[in-house]
Image (cartoon, helix red, strand yellow):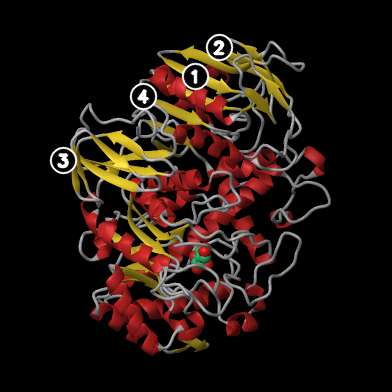
Amino acid sequence: MSPSRTPVKELSGNGKLVYGCDYNPEQWDSGTWQEDVRLMKQAGVNLVAINIFGWAELEGSPGEYSFDRLDEILDLLHANNIGVNLGTGTSSTPAWLTTLYPEILPQSASGTRAWPGGRQAWCPSSPQYREHALRLVDEMVRRYGAHPAVRLWHVSNELGCHNALCYCDVSAAAFRGWLVARYGTLDSLNQAWGTTFWSQRYSAWEQILPPRTTISTNNPTQVLDFHRFSSDELLGYYQAEADVLRQQSTVPVTTNFMVTAHIRNLDYWSWAPHMDVIANDHYLDHRLDAPTTELAFAADATRGLAQGLPWLLMEHSTSAVNWQPRNIAKRPGEMLRNSLAHVARGADGLCFFQWRASVQGSEKFHSAMLPHAGTDSRIWREVLELGGILETLAEVAGTTVQAEAALVFSWEAWWAHDQESHPSSDVRYLDQVHAMYAALWQAGITVDIVAPGADLSGYKLAVVPGLYLVRESESAVLANYVTKGGTAVVTYFSGIVDENEKVLTGGYPGAFRSVLGIRSEEFYPLPPGQSLTLDNGSTASLWTEAMRLEGAEAMATFTEGHLAGTAAVTRNRHGAGDAWYVGTVLDPAGLREVVTEAARASGITVLASPHGLEVVVRSGADSNYVFLINHSDEEHKYAAHGHELIVGEDVSHAVVIPAGAVRVVRTPNPVPHTTGLSTGPKG
Ligand code: GAL
């Protein structure tokens, strides 16, 4: 556990917002370094991550280190007053290491060993990998632990991006060790895993394996525990590097999280307490319906991991990435909107992957701050503009975001919810989370993302999408919250199993039946493409269930199908509070209506439809900063008075936000009554 968090603004070297990038000087000659540093200064860059993939450069053959070029680049950056986020360099193994120890290479569930040649090809439990990597970390910290340029240690890189789940024999042994620590006895493991089913009972620990590919389906609790183990195993590796660093250096230590749509293997709620700085990498995912809304969710989730304090965006892109099927370039102004959406939601710094676009390797078509086209380019001009705006927004550093609503999010529930042999493979955890988040986003409600069991007492509204797996202590927090006057909205396939994937019987959703005042007997998933109409005009798809009211009132009922006349959406007065249940996949407008109604009833002021205007407030001791991000093609106005920072003008009644633009209004704290959403486009 980290003793205390380092304020992100300290990493800028001047108490302002961080502006930075990954920098891979090993790909360039030292003449280019001089130009790089000159341009970095022009852009206002104050923190660069280096040596992320440096191992093979530093240790050309076992135990033979050469730090000359790294010395030179650190000194050059320092001489130019640019701080360093120093990679330990262990992320990708050198060829000699996997040639000497091929057993380091990770193995898939079906037994295929990965070959070297990509990156991160190491088994998280490998003793040979760990020994060699920690030796490099030790060399690094002895050499650079007190170097004045170093402001942050960057352990490895995106731990678990490619190698989170390894099924090799070494991992199997480590998994067994983890299980012994968790269950103590085989009996208790057999009980937790329900091994009487399909003759799966274990009579010796050695019989237990990771959930490798079987000819049918795996044991779900074994799969779930393997996820827990794998997350813990990589965290243990992070801690091993961090221990080496902390023994010899007082510089804060972190690694870059991947709170983003396509990565789910690490339970960051358990990782976060071990970081000195919470840092995230985020890339817009054009495979999603609403990439910008997902960005906001990821940013809010990162703020949740930082317990509300400012955090650092360690990587994002100036424009296209290279790893999606179609890599869409950002439109003019989009990079600024994306960047300031992160800042609005609590980031005190923005860094890009990467500084200068590579000309070789598989990322050569990934965008960068300095593109192939050079400085006579739109991207470079936008990079300069963003640097200037961050300078203007310096006073925002250290302020925090206030939210009246919470969304309960769980990596464990995600692992469990999306397992095979469930009622419908069309129903996915993250879809549920994103749908609920989008409904709140569109209603202009700022949300904190919290862990199951977190204290909800400060929130007017708590939404719980798809929390399939829930511990008794966690469901008790929700029940208590509602009893005491809180408003909850729970969605389908929540509260179904306990932490061992064991069904809570007596009717669904077992864990939340009493607070919701309902009881479902059976699920009736619908095929994709089929929808049912509800009496309030909404449509339902993919998921329905046979619900009986046990105290709750029906807020919407099915008008067709064999569930016609039964409830799809309910509301239950419980104690002093209110608990809503959404027992189907509502169309987006229908879900927004439910959420808005629940929010209004909870006392949250829901203003007129924002029409693509994202509004988030950061609060400091004396001032609030109202971020207004116009994602639409129409000009908006927003009632406010104070001072607009980006254009630099006083605002007496309303500020105009041109189509695609961002405005940030400093208002006195607390926000005066005149502040509020406009009723729509200007005019
Ligand atoms: C990240 C990674 C970077 C770079 C980037 C490209 O996952 O940390 O090294 O590969 O993606 O988008």
For marks 3 and 2, the one nearer the N-term is: 2
Give the distance between the C-alpha atoms of the residues marked 1 and 2, in whole angstroms.
9 Å
Of residues 73 and 170, the one nearer the viewer is 73
Q: Reply above or below: 612 against 581.
A: below
Query: Residue drawn 56% across and 43% down?
Result: 412
Name the spot of residue 330 as percent of width and height, x first. 49, 58
Q: In the rendered structure, find residue 604 and report the number of the disc placed on it.
A: 4
Q: Quadrant of residue 148?
A: bottom left
Q: Amino acid at mark 4?
A: Ile
Q: Is mark 2 within 8 Å of ligand 1?
A: no
Report x, y in % for residue 403: 35, 34
Upstream in the sequence, badge 1 or badge 3? 1
x and y, in percent, of residue 632 in the image: 44, 42
Taking depth in this image into account, of 63 and 318 the one nearest to the observer is: 318
Q: Which label sits in the foreground, 1 or 3?
A: 3
Identify whether 663 is placed above or below 101: above
Residue at numbered disc 3:
622
Helix, strand, or loop for circle 2? loop
| Amino acid on which disc 3 is placed | Asp
Q: Is residue 225 left or right of 75 when viewed as pictured?
A: right
Q: Amino acid at mark 1?
A: Ala
Disc 2 versus disc 4: nearer the observer: 4
Which residue is disc 2 drawn over?
A: 552
Q: CA distance from mark 3 to mark 2?
A: 44 Å
Q: Cα distance, mark 4 to mark 3? A: 23 Å
Alpha carbons under labels 1 and 3: distance apart: 36 Å
Of the two numbered discs 4 and 3 on the same chain, state the one appearing first in sequence. 4
Evaluate whether residue 630 shows in this view. Answer: yes
Residue where numbered disc 1 is placed:
579
- Tell me the element at label 3: loop
